[in-house]
Structure formats: C-alpha cells, structure tokens
Image (tube, rainbow, N blue to C red):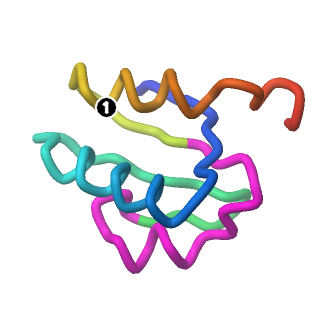
Amino acid sequence: MKERKIRLQSVEDAKKFVTLTTECDFDVDLYDNSIVVDAKSIIGVLSMDLRHVLTVKYIGENEKLEAFLDEHMKGVEKIA
C-alpha cells in the first residue's frame, strides 16, 4: 500500500483529485486523522477539512495521479 501526504488548496484541486482517482482501476482512500472517505467521491472529499494535510492511501499505479500527488505534496513537510 502506498501512502502520500498532500494538501488540497482549493475546491478546484479537490475536483481535479476526484477526477483523477475515478480514472484509477484500484481503490483510493483519503484520510484526515480518523476520518476516511472514498477519494472517488466528490461529496466525501469536499467533506474533508481542506485546511489540513491529508493522507492518500492506495494500491496501484497511475501516472496522472502520481504527478498530481507530487505537485500537491510540496510544502507539506513544513506544515505537518
């Protein structure tokens, strides 16, 4: 299982994230402490506190998703 920390800066980031996860043929979960949502659910993702650093857990590979996660983990180390 892969685990990445990200920060979604806006609702537009959240929409793009959900669009990318729905293209994946594997499960993607989004965690905020003890809260877990299906990352393919726009309602679930938007219910998260986007001010927090979130954890993405998944099994599988998708180039577009990996690129998005790389872009949205910049600066997370300083916040977390």
**Residue corresponding to mark 1:** 65
Snapshot quadrant of residue 44: bottom left
* Percent position of residue 76, x then y: 75, 31
Q: Residues within 10 Å of mark 1 (few under 14, many from 20)?
A: some
42 to 27, vertically: above or below: below
Q: Nearer the viewer, residue 37 or 46?
A: 46
Residue range corresponding to the magenta coloring: 38-55
Q: Nearer the viewer, residue 32 or 42?
A: 42
49 to 63, vertically: above or below: below
Is residue 28 at all visible to an observer of this figure? Answer: yes
Snapshot quadrant of residue 24: top left
* Percent position of residue 43, x then y: 39, 80
Q: Type of residue at label 1?
A: Leu
Describe residue 68's horizontal placement relative to residue 48 as left or right.
left
Q: Nearer the viewer, residue 59 or 24?
A: 24
Tell me which residue sits at (69%, 69%) in the image. Answer: 49
* Percent position of residue 18, x then y: 32, 57
**Magenta-drawn stretch contains 54:** yes
**Magenta-drawn stretch contains 67:** no
